[in-house]
Image (spheres, coloured by chain):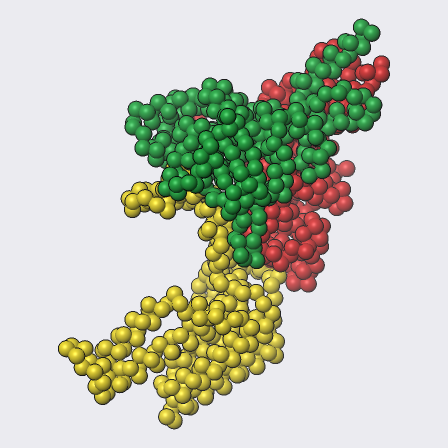
Amino acid sequence: MLRDITIGQYFPGDSVIHRLDPRFKIVITILYIVMLFSGGNYLCLAVGAVFTIGAILLSKIPLKMFVKSVKPLFIFLLITAFINLFFMSRGNVLLHWKFIKITDEGVNTSVFMVVRIVLLIMGSSLLTYTTSPITLTDAIERLLSPLRKIKFPVHELAMMMSIALRFIPTLIEETDKIMSAQKARGAEIDTGSFTTRAKNLISILVPLFISAFRRADELATAMECRCYHGGEGRTRLRQLKSAPRDYIALGVTVLFLAGVIVLGRLF
Amino acid sequence: MDNIIEIKGLHFSYETDDEEKKPVEVLKGIDLDIKQGEFVAVLGHNGCGKSTLAKHLNAILLPTEGTVTVDGIDTKDGERLFDLRQCAGMVFQNPDNQIVSSIVEEDVAFALENLGVPYEEMRRRVDDSLKAVGMYEYRLHSPSQLSGGQKQRVAIAGIIAMEPKCIILDEPTAMLDPQGRKEVLATIHRMNREKGITIVLITHYMDEAADCDRVVVMDKGEVVRDDVPEKVFSQVDKLKAIGLDVPQVTELAWELRKAGCDISPEIITEEECAAAIERLFAG
Amino acid sequence: MAILETQELTYTYSPGTPFEKTAVDHVSLKIDEGEMVGVMGHTGSGKSTLIQHFNGLLRPTSGKVLLDGKDIWADKDKIRDVRFKVGLVFQYPEYQIFEETVYKDIAFGPRNMGLDEAEIKRRVHETANDIGLSEELLERSPFELSGGQKRRVAIAGVMAMEPRVLILDEPTAGLDPAGRDKILEHIKRYHQRTKNTILIVSHSMEDIASFADKILVMSKAKLFCYDETVKVFARADEISQIGLDVPQITRVFGELKRRGLDFGKEVYTVEYARDLLLRKLKEREVR
């Protein structure tokens, strides 16, 4: 059932990580990515891994969820590994067969790259696992708010995002209903040849679009009735307040980043 | 008591895409005053113009001719648009298409956020409104987890939070099951009773109109009846002629009267009906 | 002869997860050919889940659904044929309309059945007539029509498959009295012409009382009762207890009984109530 899909992969909880100010979490995630890419050796990577695992443990989300987050990108990892393995020509040759040449440095780089990407995915999953999409949108809006000065439509984008989040479950449910209704009229959606399926897809998409437009229209009127007039002079019910723990978390991250940079230089 | 809504000679027509056709006239001269604190039902079949009338009450539509005044504000006065919309809140038919946020309490706060209400006051008003409609314990839920009746109550809370003098509800129960209908109607009646909010309920359900102070019947863009429910419903044949129903009890009394029984035509509740039949058999 | 039958039908949503919920719980019933059945129950009583089993949109977790005495899931590949024999019209069916003309939209189902053009034409015209859509509407865009007309186009789309059982989930939801009467009247007319079995889900007891030979009541995933209309309304008190309404007129006669005026009959339509009262009044005068 389509309805079972959860969007944003958010796991509600009450851990330290969950409670961090989402604005700090976004900044920390960016610093974390910088950390992973600024260290060029295994020692740096180990420091990054310690940081990742520490954060995951603090979040109290089962480790297997993070393994799951890597799975969809498995093919991508494989390709990365192969490219590095076969196209790195520097270093001592370990194997040479016809046009294939594998060097020790090639092996080294591919392992390094794969570990780095896995850490990257796990770390950024932690952000979406512990922050609800709506909070995330809100935090992005506030972080980007200085851009309003150069006429960048920060509020409008955030409003669009949050409305999209609001209507995803509604539209999924609607798709489900329309699919059942067309199936009851004999439309083959899961079976049948490619062309009939493509044709039958139209019988779902047309009603879905019409309904989405109708909803958008009604919602716009309802928003107007509740005095919506853009971001100007708006106050917010959701208050983002930073606590000491946010600064501590940021401090720890900066320390780790500094450590990685120093280690990268030394070795 | 003062009039909160004053409608004078309201005409509304819109142009069609087809240039040769004449503009379609939806409202053909409506005069209507509604007093502060009244509970008024506007009754009519689909396409009689009742929704168009509702949309004039908070300036979603503006009159082609005539004036609409709400709490002394002319709806054409663009300067006072937000005052007007705060004063006359609007609840629509489809509960899904008027909820903006994915969290109940943030949706209730939406209008207040737009109006720039300071946080402390906003918090208080949101909590009070949610309690008033009995949805406080659901404040952190997502609207998609709620039933239709609950969603509609959240929408009402979102309007109550603006502290309006008047709420206009455009067929708020048409898409709900009987349970949801009961919840929503009970909520509206309570708002009217306890907070003294004027209610304009647009509907085609006769039983909903039977509980109101006053029923305004519309047909083809005109007000054809405007009276207390007993008087309006007693004219069963006239209502049926314009595609409306009457409660079964009213219909029974009317049928019996037609067959020569001595029974009042102004019956709208089950108790009244049972008592009247009892009298028939006692006499 | 039973056309539709369920044996211990059970359906569980998301089994094995924390969201597990049994929506239909060991329901066994037989629906005879040619009956007009009213289906009632709360939102969440399992009635919608139940009707989606009748045309194989849902597959029972356990138990069986029989059509003409044959298990519809005996051959999984033939399930599409079951959907042609048991037509299901969903709630707000106008939201499934997608073709550019009314004709094409009504023809969608018959075309999926693989019928030839002449037969499709015959069926479209016949059902359009049944449901009260005039010929000139057929070439119009369905999106230009009124709400009630759109609803009838969508219903015709299922009727045109000429299903032996037609199931309608709240066909009058959201319509005004005139629109509601029109739809019910045309469904009744279709029933009289085709003699097909019809199931109508409705929240309005007044409506159900006006058309149903039999009533099926679901409550809390179980079959509460399935019986003749008179017998079901005779249990008005029990029905009120499970949170469903009985027609207003039935409640009035319940109240009269409490006041000591017992007419000894179940009353659920205004016409019947009028005739009964007038007869009783006359009898009284004679005495």
Chain in green in the render: C
The furthest residue to the bottom? A266
Q: Residue at x 65, y 40 (%)?
A: B179
Colour given to chain B in the rendered image? red
The furthest residue to the right? B283
The furthest residue to the left? A98
The picture places residue C69, in percent across and down from the top left corner, at 47, 32
Q: Quadrant of residue B237?
A: top right
Residue A236 appears anywhere in the view: yes
User: In terms of depth relative to the viewer, which is nearer, C191 or C27?
Assistant: C27
Q: Residue at x 42, y 40 (%)?
A: C74
Vertical placement of residue A103 versus B153, above or below: below
Judge left or right: residue C107 versus residue C175: left
Vertical placement of residue C183 versus B165, above or below: above
The picture places residue A14, in percent across and down from the top left corner, at 60, 69
User: In terms of depth relative to the viewer, which is nearer, A79 or B279?
Assistant: A79
The picture places residue A201, in percent across and down from the top left corner, at 36, 44
User: In terms of depth relative to the viewer, which is nearer, A136 or C157?
Assistant: C157
The picture places residue B67, in percent across and down from the top left corner, at 60, 35
Residue C157 appears anywhere in the view: no
Q: Residue at x 55, y 73 (%)?
A: A59
Colour given to chain A in the rendered image? yellow
Judge left or right: residue A148 versus residue C206: left
Q: Residue at x 53, y 38 (%)?
A: C7
Vertical placement of residue B156 versus C278, above or below: below
Count of picture labels: 0
Query: Which of the image's four quarters has the C terminus of chain A?
Result: bottom left
